[in-house]
Each structure stands twice: as structure tokens, then as C-alpha cells.
Image (tube, grey):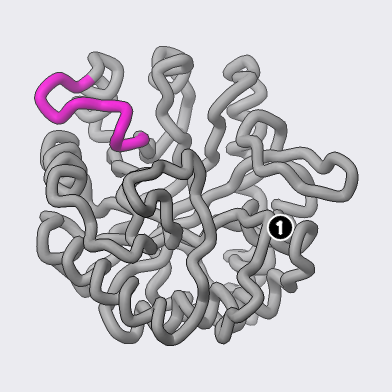
């Protein structure tokens, strides 16, 4: 399913069971994102039900569909994702441009797709299958990588741009992943942003990480760093994102620290809206 309307989401936070009550109490939270594989459509956690009752938008985020796999998407996984989207009244769902399994083996990680013309045909076909089965629009996320395939013909941004043109899929741009790929692979975030069709932007991820021995680890368990906020600023200078979401998946800080990170994100967005208004 596709739609010409990209909803305005605002500023949000990743909902996690470990911080469910803290998320409920955070002021000014417009929406939350939930890992789709972590909830059941017929038995939503009370915290999510409470947020929905208050009018907070909930967006399911898949991590295991594997749209970059050589095989077609698993119908059972698609049905589960669709069921969660319907249960939370989601305006859209998201997944990754990645492969996660082959030959019956689970990688346990979001692995980069070989960015070739041949792979593009396969991924585009998989995306169309997912779009037919999902009740709401689909957005695809760029991933954090520690390796690049030697025969890549396209950058990740070029690959995503062609997918958008062929399928109408939306984009979830993770600025922390762009920073990760800058450190690990030498990819220029600004150049990637210039190649992306930001008019298809659904929302943005922001997350923390840490550098060890010259390798950036996208941990989602550390504070958001200034370089990641700089990439967010570069994106906001090019487009007004419909939504921006802070991800945290471990070493959860006190609510006040989460609020401070959300405020830092809001400041970046506000600054660039103000600068755009002056032009």
C-alpha cells in the first residue's frame, strides 16, 4: 500500500519495555516507535495502550523482515508486522535496507546489501511484495555498516534513491548510521544526503554510539554526540523532516537525560526552521 501523504510526527522516542513508564511521563513527546518483533498485536503492553489513549502516535519498526534477502519476504513475518501496525493504529511502518538471513541461517545482524543493479531488482521486488501486504506505507532505513562489498556499483543513497523511484517507498534516514559509515567506511554524509530524494522522507533516527580503536560502534547505549547532531543539522538544512526520533536500546539514563537529548534534537530543528524562514 502507498500514500501520497507523509504524516507530521514531531519529536519522538523509541519505546522500550525497560523504560515504559519513563516514556509515559516525558513531557512534550509527540510519538513513539516500537520494535515490531517485541510486541504482540493481540496483547499490547499497558504502557503503549496508555500512550495511544492519550493520542500519542505509535510507529512499528521492523528489524527482521530482511527485504535485502535473496528470497521473498516471509509471509508470516509480513502478516505479523501488518497486525502490529493495525493494532496500534500506525500511519506507517519502517524496516531496513539490509539482509538478515540466507540458506536457513540467521545473521543476527543487519548486513549491507550488495549495491549492484542485480541486487536492486531483487530488493525492489521484495519491497513491492511488502507494500502489497502492509496496510500502511513502508519506509526503508539506511544501515550502519562495518564493511562494504567490493563490487558495489552504487552508493547506499543512490541505491535507496532508485528504490524510491521504482517503488514509491518512503525513507527513514538514520543520521547516526551516516556518521557510523563516515568513520568506518569513509562515506561523506553530506554527499549521501545530496543523493537522497528527501521529498520521500518519512522520518529521521538519531542515536548515540562510541568510537573504539578507530571503529564507530552504533550502540544506541551512549549519549548522542555532537558529530551526529551535525549530520542532523545538515539534513535539516536540506529538508524539514516530518519526524525525528531518539533511539536508546541499553544503559538507559535517567528521564532527565533523555529529555535533555530530545531538547538538543529540537534545538537543531528549530534553528534550521528559523534560518529557512529568514531566506
The vertical placement of 273 against 150, above or below, is above
Tell me if residue 269 can be seen.
Answer: no
Where does residue 1 sit, x and y in percent of width and height? 13, 66
Q: Which residue is mark 1?
A: 179
Q: Which residues are magenta?
A: 35-44
Looking at the image, residue 215 sits to the left or right of residue 76; the answer is right
| Local crowd size for mark 1, using a 10 Å CA cut-off: few (<14), some (14–19), many (≥20) | many
Q: Magenta span has 60?
A: no
Total number of numbered discs in the rendering: 1
Residue 40 among those drawn in magenta = yes
Residue at x 29% of width, y 59% of height = 7
Q: Which residue: 51% across, 44% down?
A: 109
Which x, y percent locates residue 160?
A: 45, 75
Give me the residue at 54% from left, 76% from top. Answer: 157
Check disc 1 and report its element: helix, strand or loop: helix
Front-most of residues 60 and 56 = 60
The x and y percentages for residue 223 are: 71, 33
Q: Is residue 131 left or right of residue 234?
A: left
Residue 209 seen in the figure: yes
Q: Quadrant of residue 242 in the image?
A: bottom left
Q: Residue at x 54, y 40 (%)?
A: 246
Q: Residue furthest right?
A: 213
Q: Is residue 40 left or right of residue 188?
A: left
Amino acid at each position: 500500500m502507498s500514500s501520497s501523504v507523509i504524516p507530521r510526527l514531531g519529536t519522538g522516542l523509541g519505546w522500550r519495555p525497560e523504560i515504559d513508564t519513563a516514556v509515559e511521563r516525558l513531557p512534550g513527546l509527540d510519538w513513539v516507535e516500537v520494535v515490531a518483533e517485541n510486541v504482540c498485536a493481540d496483547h499490547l503492553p499497558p504502557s503503549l495502550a496508555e500512550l495511544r489513549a492519550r493520542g500519542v502516535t505509535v510507529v512499528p519498526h521492523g528489524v527482521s523482515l530482511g527485504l535485502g534477502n535473496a528470497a521473498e519476504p516471509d509471509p508470516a513475518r509480513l502478516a505479523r508486522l501488518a497486525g502490529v501496525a493495525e493494532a496500534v493504529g500506525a500511519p506507517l511502518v519502517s524496516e531496513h535496507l539490509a539482509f538478515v538471513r540466507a540458506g536457513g541461517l540467521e545473521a543476527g545482524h543487519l548486513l549491507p546489501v550488495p549495491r549492484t543493479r542485480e541486487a536492486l531488482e531483487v530488493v525492489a521486488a521484495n519491497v513491492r511484495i511488502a507494500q502489497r501486504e502492509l496496510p500502511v506505507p513502508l519506509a526503508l532505513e539506511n544501515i550502519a555498516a562495518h564493511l562494504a562489498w567490493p563490487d558495489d556499483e552504487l552508493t547506499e543513497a543512490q541505491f535507496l534513491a532508485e528504490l524510491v523511484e521504482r517503488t514509491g517507498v518512503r525513507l527513514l534516514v538514520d543520521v547516526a548510521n551516516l556518521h557510523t559509515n563516515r568513520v568506518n567506511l569513509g562515506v561523506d554524509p553530506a554527499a549521501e544526503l545530496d543523493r537522497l530524494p528527501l521529498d520521500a522522507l518519512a522520518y529521521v533516527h538519531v542515536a548515540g554510539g562510541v568510537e573504539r580503536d578507530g571503529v564507530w560502534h552504533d550502540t544506541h547505549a551512549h549519549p548522542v554526540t555532537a558529530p551526529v547532531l551535525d549530520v542532523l543539522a545538515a539534513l535539516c538544512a536540506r529538508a524539514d523532516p516530518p519526524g525525528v526520533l531518539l533511539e536508546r536500546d541499553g544503559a538507559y539514563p535517567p528521564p532527565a537525560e533523555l529529555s535533555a537529548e530530545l531538547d538538543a534534537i529540537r534545538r537543531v530543528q528549530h534553528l534550521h526552521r528559523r534560518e529557512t524562514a529568514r531566506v
